[in-house]
């Protein structure tokens, strides 16, 4: 678990600095100081500062780990999904510079290597699958699609909202817009529409 914590410290420190100082202005030395790690430790996990651009999905997953204990307070699985979405988008809006989100999304389109956002081993996908399976078992979600298909639909919807927000250069609140629109986009998966 120490490995995850060390990598997480580096990622969190880097993205905090990218947001506060800008990507270009942030040096590896700044990241080392903020994360309280050595240069060797940094290079054990990342080959360069540019490699950190693909680590945003790791930061998203950490947010989901942090939020999961709060899910018990919701009565429905759809409420859980809407809560997770609102909290993630609030984090993005307040801690991720839009230019960096644009770089991440565009890099995923052209990369020949790992597409971090699509990595099915991410915590994000595991948690969503758990929620959709529970929702199907309780009769809340349709069984016309598999749990994996529902997860994919949800992930596509989230990426679409992020992409549009970037395309519009953040001229509206991502969290507020998503809070209004997500129930409409996801309404098709419900057996009833009472959200």
Image: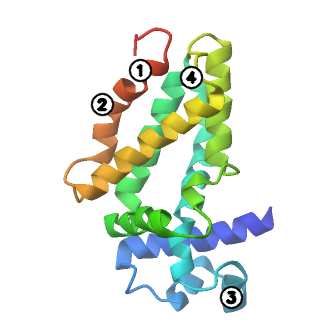
Q: Which mark is residue 77?
A: 4
Rendered image coloring scheme: rainbow
Give the side of residue 30 with respect to residue 125, left or right.
Answer: left
Instruction: Answer with mark 1 or mark 4, whichever residue precedes in sequence.
Output: 4
Indicate which label's residue lies in the foreground, 2 or 3.
Answer: 2
Depth check: give the residue in front, 8 or 45: 45
Task: Quickly name the residue at label 3.
Answer: 38
Q: In 3D space, how far apart are the residues under numbered discs 2 and 3 (Cα atoms)? A: 44 Å
Q: Are marks 2 and 1 in contact (CB under 8 Å)?
A: no
Indicate which label's residue lies in the foreground, 3 or 4.
Answer: 4
Q: Which mark is residue 31?
A: none
**Which structural element holds mark 1?**
helix
Instruction: Answer with mark 2 or mark 3, whichever residue precedes in sequence.
Output: 3
**Which structural element holds mark 2?**
helix
**Which structural element holds mark 4?**
helix
Residue 180 image position (x, y, % from top left):
30, 30
Residue 21 image position (x, y, % from top left):
36, 79
Q: Are marks 3 and 1 in contact (CB under 8 Å)?
A: no
Task: Quickly name the residue at label 1.
Answer: 187
Q: Judge whether 25 appears above or below 5 on screen.
A: below
State the residue at coordinates (55%, 75%): 52
Instruction: Answer with mark 3 or mark 1, whichever residue precedes in sequence.
Output: 3
Instruction: Answer with mark 3 or mark 4, whichever residue precedes in sequence.
Output: 3
Q: Are marks 1 and 4 in contact (CB under 8 Å)?
A: no
Crowd class of label 3 (few under 14; some 14 to 19; many from 20; radius 10 Å): few
Dividing the picture into quadrants, the one containing residue 62 is bottom right
Task: Quickly name the residue at label 2.
Answer: 180
Q: Judge whether 61 appears above or below 175 on screen.
A: below
Residue 29 image position (x, y, % from top left):
54, 91
Q: In 3D space, how far apart are the residues under numbered discs 1 and 4 (Cα atoms)? A: 13 Å
């Amino acid at each position: 678990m120490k490995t995850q914590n060390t990598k997480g410290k580096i990622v969190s420190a880097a993205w905090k600095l990218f947001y506060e100082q800008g990507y270009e202005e942030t040096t590896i030395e700044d990241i080392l100081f903020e994360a309280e790690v050595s240069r060797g430790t940094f290079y054990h996990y990342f080959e360069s500062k540019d490699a950190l651009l693909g680590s945003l999905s790791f930061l998203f997953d950490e947010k989901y780990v942090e939020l999961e204990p709060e899910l018990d307070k919701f009565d429905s699985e759809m409420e859980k999904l809407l809560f997770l979405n609102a909290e993630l988008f609030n984090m993005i809006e307040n801690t991720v510079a839009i230019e960096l989100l644009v770089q991440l999304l565009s890099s995923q389109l052209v990369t020949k290597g790992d597409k971090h956002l699509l990595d099915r081993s991410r915590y994000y996908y595991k948690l969503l699958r758990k929620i959709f399976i529970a929702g199907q078992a309780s009769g809340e979600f349709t069984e016309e699609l598999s749990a994996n298909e529902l997860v994919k639909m949800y992930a596509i919807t989230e990426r679409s909202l992020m992409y549009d927000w970037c395309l519009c250069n953040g001229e509206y609140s991502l969290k507020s817009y998503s809070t209004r629109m997500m129930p409409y986009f996801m309404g098709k998966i419900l057996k009833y529409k009472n959200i």
